[in-house]
Amino acid sequence: MPINRDILLTVFFAAVAASAGAAPATRLFAGGSWAAVDRGAVCEAGTRSEKIAVKGKVQAMAGFAFSADRRRWGEFYVRLSRPSRPGSTVILTVAGQPFLLSARGDWAWSSSAAQQSAIMAAVRSSPRMTVETRDSAGRRFRDPYRLDGAPTAIDAAAARCAGKMR
């Protein structure tokens, strides 16, 4: 089923604004399932899970963050649809390749620059990815994502923040 781009943008921009303390965001790119935004100090390429959250629940989303100071350069992050159980692993799988993410609550992220690069390369050549973990009750859950549009969104976010370098 095709994803409605307007719904994607609405959800993504709302999530970016909420996570950034309502910092203004400028749209750089929107295509496929992904969008790229510039919100000042950080540029992001992101998407939301194929599973649409019901009203009042958290919408799972994932993306890559780039900052002009390069402290975050391709950092992969994911907001889980439910908080993970403390001590449980969060696994991102792209093209059959698993990546163990660092996690706290309902957020998880890449753990090193080498892992960020490997995730980005896998995302560029795969149509889908999934994030899997266990919730506080110990139930396994998965958040699936489509990757169409991801390479262009990543490039747009990286290029915009690279242009802000001093």
Image (spheres, grey):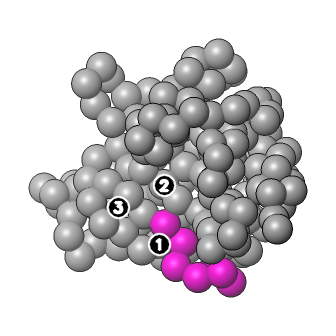
Q: Earlier in the sequence, mark 3 or mark 1?
A: 1
Which label was assigned to residue 133?
A: 3
Which segment did they paint magenta? 109-115
Which residue is painted at 51% across and 38% down in the image? 23
Label 1 is placed on what type of residue? Answer: Leu
Separation of residues labelled 3 and 2 (CA atoms) = 12 Å
Q: Residue 156 placed where, x, y %?
A: 83, 47
Q: Mark 3: few, some, or many residues within 10 Å (few <14, many ≥20)?
A: many
* Image quarter hosting the N terminus: top right
Mark 3 in CB contact with mark 2 (< 8 angstroms): no
Query: Does 130 sit above or below residue 16?
Result: below
Q: Is residue 79 visible?
A: yes
Q: CA distance from mark 3 to mark 1?
A: 10 Å
Depth order, front residue of 136/106: 106
The residue to which callout 1 is attached is: 101
Q: CA distance from mark 2 to mark 1?
A: 9 Å
Which residue lies at the image location 64% right of the left edge and 47% below the top edge?
40
Please tell me whether residue 8 belongs to the stretch shown in magenta: no
Residue at left 62%, top 42%?
39
Q: Secondary structure at mark 3?
A: strand
- The answer to if 113 sits in the magenta stretch is yes
Mark 3 vs mark 1: in front: 1
User: Considering the numbered disc 1 on the image, is that residue within a helix, a strand or a loop?
Assistant: strand
Tell me if 78 is positioned left or right of 118 in this view: left
Q: Nearer the viewer, residue 41 or 150?
A: 41
Mark 2 lies on residue? 78
115 in relation to 125, above or below: below
